[in-house]
Amino acid sequence: MNRAALIVNPFASRVTEERLASVERELRRNVELTVLLTEQGGHATELARGLEREGALYVFGGDGLLNEVLNGVEDDVVVGVLPGGHTNVLARAFGVPLDPVAAARALISAQPRRISLGRANGRRFAFAAGIGFDAELVRRVDELGRRSDGRRPGDLAFTWEAAKLLAGRRGRYEPVLEIEGFGRAAFALVANGYPYSYAGSRPLRVAPDARFELGLDLVAPQRLVPRVIPRFIAYAFRGGGERAEDVFYGHDLDRIEVRCDAPLPLQVDGEDLGDVDSVLFEAERDAVSILAPDAATLRA
């Protein structure tokens, strides 16, 4: 019987004792399983570094847990994502069932898909990173704290905080950073794959050409004013081939260097990394293997 480990965030939005027990039973039918529960932020990185390099490593939690694990695993470890968070971007993008038990069943026979990762000042990320607007939004939602059951706020909280953030600035974001080789911009969104994220069940098509097998994609509005906000919102949900003259785009990049006029918030995979004066985004190509039921198909 193959050996495997399961790292679990017991406080993730959709992780319960009952679901965990069901996931364990499903996996144990096929593998000799070691279960490890995280106790605090950063613990998953430590756990991933301490694992023996044999068999698969399953991750049951949200996007933040996966991010921590990816910052601890060796390159030859195969990772399986069991959706237990609120958004579960990577799991959805790879066609993993959102029911964790069905996901465990599907991943047992799934083939590994070799993908690239991004890095922001050395910190790995799986699907997206940003400096400025979206990172500030992540921070505002985090500041709301967790509910009494330990879960993070949901989509309504993000929508409300985004509306307040834009209202507080009267819908204006002026150029406050310099992107080497592109120019001055109001904020920067960096995608390692597609979609950038999800709003409820709808994918955010911020960088529709981005693919997990390639380098990084950049989308950076030069400035934001009230009259163009509807266009940006429509683009985020619709995506497609249109390009605006007031937005910088970059595709399949190995390096994106950003310098800020003043410290700005930075986020990776929805995790707040604090304020930075500058950030170097790098593509780490052919970085890690992810179990995916649709491993042979590029999702569009």
Image (cartoon, rainbow, N blue to C red):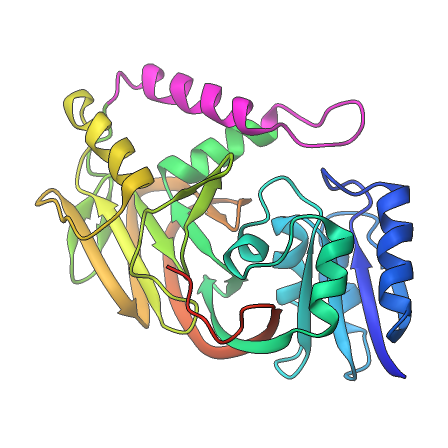
Residue 73 in sight? no
Q: Position of residue 273 (x, y in %)?
A: 53, 47
Give the x, y percent position of residue 194: 40, 57
- Residue 22 sits above or below residue 111 on the image: above
Between 175 and 81, the residue placed more toward the observer is 81
Q: Position of residue 102 (x, y in %)?
A: 74, 55
Residue 145 on the magenta segment: yes
Regarding residue 190, the answer to whether it shows in the image is yes
Is residue 78 found left or right of 178 in the rendered image?
Answer: right
- Quadrant for the N terminus in the image: bottom right
Indicate left or right for 13 with 20 as reference.
left
- Taking the image as shown, residue 217 lies to the left or right of residue 136, namely left
Residue 120 location (% of width, % of height): 45, 60
Q: Is residue 134 above or below residue 220?
A: above
Given residues 297 and 48, the one toward you in this image is 297
The part of the chain drawn in magenta is: 143-171
Residue at (84% x, 49% y) in the render: 39
Q: Residue at x 26, y 16 (%)?
A: 170
